[in-house]
Image (spheres, helix red, strand yellow):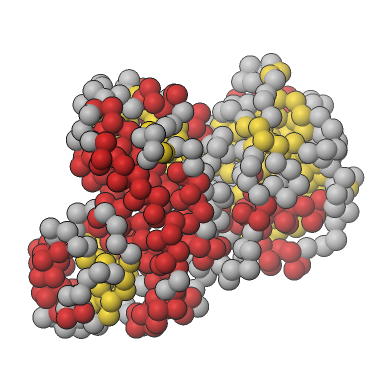
Amino acid sequence: MCGIIGYNGFRDANKVLIDGLKRLEYRGYDSSGISVIDKKQQIFKEVGEIKELEKNLPDFKGSIGVSHTRWSTHGAVTKANAHPHLSTNKKIAVVHNGIIENFQKLRENLTKKGYKFLSNTDSEVLAHLIEDNYKGNLQKAIFNALKKVEGYYAIVVTSTDEPDKIVGARKDSPLVVGVGDNENFLASDITAFLKYTNRVIYLEDKELCVITKKDITIYDENYKTVDKEINLIDWDISDAEKSGFAHFMLKEIYDQPDTVNNVLRGRVSEVDQYIEFAEKVEKELKPDLDSIHIIACGTSFYSGLVAKYMIEKIADIPVSVELSSEYRYFGTKKENSLVIAITQSGETLDTLAALKEAKNSGCQTLAITNVIGSTVTRLADAYILTQSGPEIGVAATKTFTSQIIILFLVALKLAIKKGTITSDELYNYILNVKELPKQIRQVLEKSDEIEKIAETLKHAHSVFFIGRGINYPIALEGALKLKEISYIHAEGFAAGELKHGPFALLTKETPVIAIATKDFTYDKILANIGEVKARGPQVIAIADETDTEIEKHADFVLRYPTNQTILTSIPITVTLQLLAYHVANLRGCSIDKPRNLAKSVTVE
Ligand code: F6R
């Protein structure tokens, strides 16, 4: 799970590559490296963040090169293990994202042949293997080398013997081509080159691509050239920049009124009473589905849990939600059920593998993702885009709320088809979902108030989040946000479960965040707050703005705007995102790049 970029054009390669790496840094940030051709491979690597590489980088001349930001899987974090890796003859430079599973065997064979290894990584075998297969044509050497490789990869390669070209190849790891004028790019992600071009070619698994300054040639898995479509991306470079915010995460939290509007745009109308998706999606949303299985990881898994409440309530279809890493090996794959994979990046390996299993068992599949052209969009029978723009902060925020809204629309669509919703109910749901951008703005205006509450949490060692019904997964997500960016231990619980064990951990030093909604669970949550308070902790309630009772029960109250319970999960989520952000900021944490985490988990 690393970021790679290759550049071939007329600009200073050093600058383009460093700039691209900074935009890919969310994919990994333990070490990085760059190699630019000027007769020889000029190579430089550094441990730490990209700014360390930039600070010490020699002034390499040249306009063709490759670079890499690493999140280590094989081998410690050292300069030697950072990419690019050079072949033994020092002519070939390789950057790699993925895992070469048979690297030990390949390494032994290559060592016997006299190739010299300088690192402990699996990736280095590629450089020597390509040299071993080289007979005057770089792409042919790579094609032949990759036949011997087991595992998955996105690679970008240069050679001083053919200094006018860069070759890229992918299998199960992302790699896209940026099409410029007299310059071309290869990168893990569009954001790396969006500043220069918004024209993109998506590579399929086992395809290989040769870019010169002027031309792009793509070969299929049989080494036949193929014509590929150039796609126009409507993301703006400002979407991939901080626009004056202190952190990407904060900007992305503030993006949410717009991203929610984007999700809804063209898909709903209360006047004409429709919910509309692309034709392919509509076909998957059959009214006679026996069940729906949702698969996802992390935050996306929690949006699946939220969706379970929505789909079961509105469309009356049973929904199971499973972690992709479990489903892939143990999940039941039933006929006439729909498998929905939720993945912001579209590249999470466990989710892709689980989706493949489901497909192989004959299930119909639908993906919900933020990244057009990502692997999941090619794997699933149909997909829906969350249209949130690039999310750079490692902690997912705006894509979570967009996923929930897409799934809410899926619930409405199924309910219309099944006839489980009246036209008045539909009208009200749509009116209420359209209120959300305004309601999110109201929450954002409370940022200072939320920061004051964050002050009370900043020295906590452990924080509990409790909620009932649809707010149970929101409590889980609130806890995940807090733990991943502030490093405070946090757990989310279904409020009724506290007394079945977790109470043992409660002391007055364990603040509890209680989500209280004005529905039939309200008295129950008040009772839970009472049980908590009896054990000494401070309670921070997240409560409806019309709630006149809550102050008597909680120590602090943060208010969210009134809506139907099923939709209040959105403003409540935004409140919890801001709370986590402020706590982490007050603690001076690395908010956009939390330790040990990477944005896109492309390893098992
Ligand atoms: C947490 C977070 C992760 C991701 C998870 C799945 O803030 O971002 O838990 O949600 O790694 O990623 P995607 O959605 O890309 O499959």
Q: Is residue 165 left or right of residue 102?
A: right
User: Does 149 sit above or below residue 234?
Assistant: above
Give percent across and percent down for residue 316: 19, 35
User: Does 382 sit above or below residue 180?
Assistant: above
Residue 419 placement: quadrant: top left
At 31% from the left edge and 71% from the top edge, which residue is drawn?
559
User: Does 29 sit above or below residue 463?
Assistant: above
At 34% from the left edge and 51% from the top edge, which residue is drawn?
432
Give percent across and percent down for residue 408: 33, 43
- Looking at the image, can residue 320 be seen? no
At 77% from the left edge and 44% from the top edge, which residue is drawn?
7
Residue 440 placement: quadrant: bottom left
At 45% from the left edge and 43% from the top edge, which residue is drawn?
264
Query: Residue 170 or 158: which is nearer the viewer?
Result: 170
User: Does 120 sit above or below residue 424?
Assistant: below
Looking at the image, how many numbered discs can be counted on the residues? 0
Q: Is residue 424 left or right of residue 359?
A: left
Give percent across and percent down for residue 392: 56, 56
Q: Is residue 401 left or right of residue 49?
A: left
- Looking at the image, can residue 594 be seen? yes
Specify the farthest residue to the front.
271
Q: Is residue 342 left or right of residue 427?
A: right
Give percent across and percent down for residue 580: 40, 69
Q: Quadrant of the C terminus?
A: top left
Residue 574 placement: quadrant: bottom left
Query: Residue 105 or 84: which is nearer the viewer?
Result: 84
Query: Residue 169 or 582: which is nearer the viewer?
Result: 582
